[in-house]
Amino acid sequence: MKPQQERNERIARTMIKNLQRRHIEAFYCPTGEEAVRKVSELIADGSSVTWGGSMTVRDLGIPDYLRSRASLEVLDRDLVTTPEEKQDMYLRAFSADVYLTSANAISEDGVIVNIDGNGNRVAAITWGPKKVIFVIGLNKVAQTVEAALSRVRGTASPINAARFDINTPCQHDGICHNCNSPESICNYVHFLRNSPRGRHTVVLVGENLGY
């Protein structure tokens, strides 16, 4: 095993213990392929399922996999085209059995940090779907909660601003300006530090995934 793989295994073991102390079920998968299989195991036949705007979920091909499972009711957000359809899909997500997403960052002691523009993703993480599954690459691990928030604002948000091609200062120079731009995607800051009723599951992946 290579040193990077050894480190990944060790930090994943530590983080799983820390997440379990927060009543969050957690698993480690060395590869994305294994992560997709684990996600599959966690979703029972007959479940209704949808996902947030996660590049990790998309990069792993999870939506296509879900569509291929005839036993699932897929609330497919990728098929909506109008603002009205999008709003309806956001609302329908609250009644889903399973909501899939990633995180902008996670601290070594298990606090999951997200920043959202519209708020639909952090709203679903907080309340509604019976089960929330996070798929998180180890590239998003930060040493502390403060470092996790710094990663979100300094790394993830500028990249997402470029992805959406929005007119914010970070889109132009790649640096967070703590702006109040009308097009800001940093409107809602969410910390998940404990899972009421054990709604949340984390699948850590030993690859660089998403932003």
Image (cartoon, rainbow, N blue to C red):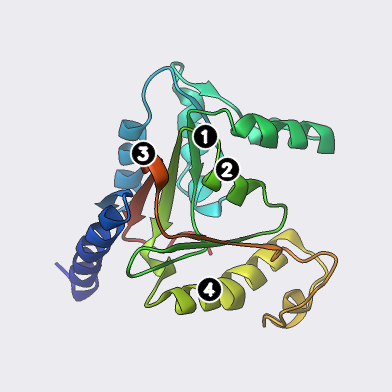
The earlier-in-sequence mark between 4 and 3 is: 3
- Residue tagged 4: 149
Query: Residue 195, how many percent across, how many down?
Result: 40, 49
- Residue tagged 2: 124
- Residue tagged 3: 39
Q: Amino acid at mark 1?
A: Pro
Q: CA gap, disc 3 to disc 1?
A: 16 Å
Q: Amino acid at mark 4?
A: Leu
Crowding at dot 3, Cα within 10 Å, few <14 / some 14-19 / many 20+, comes out as some
Q: CA gap, disc 2 to disc 4?
A: 20 Å
Q: Secondary structure at mark 4?
A: helix
Q: CA gap, disc 2 to disc 3?
A: 18 Å
- Residue tagged 1: 129
Q: Is residue 51 left or right of residue 27?
A: right
Q: Secondary structure at mark 3?
A: helix
The answer to whether the residues at label 1 and label 2 have Cβ atoms under 8 Å apart is yes
